[in-house]
Amino acid sequence: PHMLFFTKDGKYALLSYVATGHVVFIDAASRAPIGCVSLGKNAHAAWPTANGKVAIGANIAEKKLVRIATDYANKKFTVNDTVALGALEPILPDAAPICPITENTSQFAFVTPRGGGLAVYDITTTPMFLNGTIPPAAVRPAGCGGVQIGATMYLNSGGGWPNTPLNHDVYAFGVGALPQMTVPTRIGGRDGGDSHGMVGIGGKYLWSGDRHLNLIDVYDTGNGNIKVGTITLAGGVSNDPAPDLMDAAPDGSYVFVALRGPNPLTGNHKDANNAVGSTPGVGVIKVEGGGKSGKLVSIAPISRMVEEKDKDGNMVKKEKADPHGIQVRKK
């Protein structure tokens, strides 16, 4: 399992299996699977719409965007449209979709390609209609995070891929202009980092994590998207937490973050080790200043020890736990 999302009402979960191509639908209260569909060779992420009518899946391996009709009450889930993104490659250098981020009206999906740029699709039409693209010069490669606060969609760029071992940029896109396309504004970033997880706090602050440098940058979305601070996570609780995806408690008092392991299963560039962490588990961050700051206070550890041969042929135990997807649900 790779990516996890809850429906807006918190009643159902969508779990994507990156290696097998399946998306499993789960009743959140009982934890029971109620349906399963295949996106093909790969299912990196399946993003539910706010209205609960469809989910949009990203198949990286076959460069496809897949729409799933979702009837949760009757436990019926059906792939009803697939768009091949390879046709965009004269415009976008590598159109393999990383994340298909749906906005609050459930009409548009922001698709972040592996090679950079952005594609926006109207997901209410059949076939899904390409509303427009933005070139890689304006949005750098492999974004995964996406958070809407008010009328602004915040997107990022990320590392871990062969052409972009390290990448960290944060962009703001005004959704109110849609269906007209506008070039996103780059509000922050850094060289040598790897942006992946993002979360909104209290409808005001945006947190953007850096899993390579163990940092979280904080932006004030109500004050020109200015960067107001950086939270340092490495310290007494963990010397190398490697923060990945994150989500906030319903009251905004804590943020929970997936902390990567020493042998990452996905998203790691072997020369940069951008996704390598020392304490796999769920990090608990106490939110301070109403969202302006925070502190890593604890870790719920996850472990999976596997015995295998080292380079000399000796049997050794290795930690293979590697959390990635995470969501918070109010019970």
Image (spheres, grey):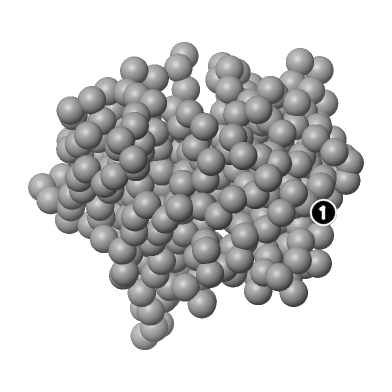
282 relative to 61 in the view: left or right: left
The residue depicted at 68 percent of the width and 22 percent of the height is 51
Which image quadrant for residue 80?
top right
Q: Nearer the viewer, residue 162 or 173?
A: 173
Query: How packed is label 1: few (under 14 Cα within 10 Å), some, or many (20 or more)?
Result: some
The residue depicted at 36 percent of the width and 36 percent of the height is 221
Secondary structure found at label 1: strand
Q: How many marks?
A: 1
138 relative to 264 in the view: left or right: right
Can you give x and y, in whole percent of width and height, for residue 129 in the image?
81, 47
- Amino acid type indicated by mark 1: Val
The residue depicted at 20 percent of the width and 45 percent of the height is 229
53 relative to 80 in the view: left or right: left
Q: Nearer the viewer, residue 244 or 262?
A: 244
Can you give x and y, in whole percent of width and height, for residue 286 in the image?
21, 30
Visible residue check, residue 317: no
Q: Nearer the viewer, residue 291 or 98?
A: 291
The residue depicted at 85 percent of the width and 38 percent of the height is 125
Visible residue check, residue 53: yes
Q: 3 above or below 116?
A: above
Residue that numbered label 1 is attached to: 83
240 relative to 137 in the view: left or right: left
Can you give x and y, in whole percent of width and height, for residue 193 in the image?
32, 64
Can you give x and y, in whole percent of width and height, for residue 261 in the image?
35, 56
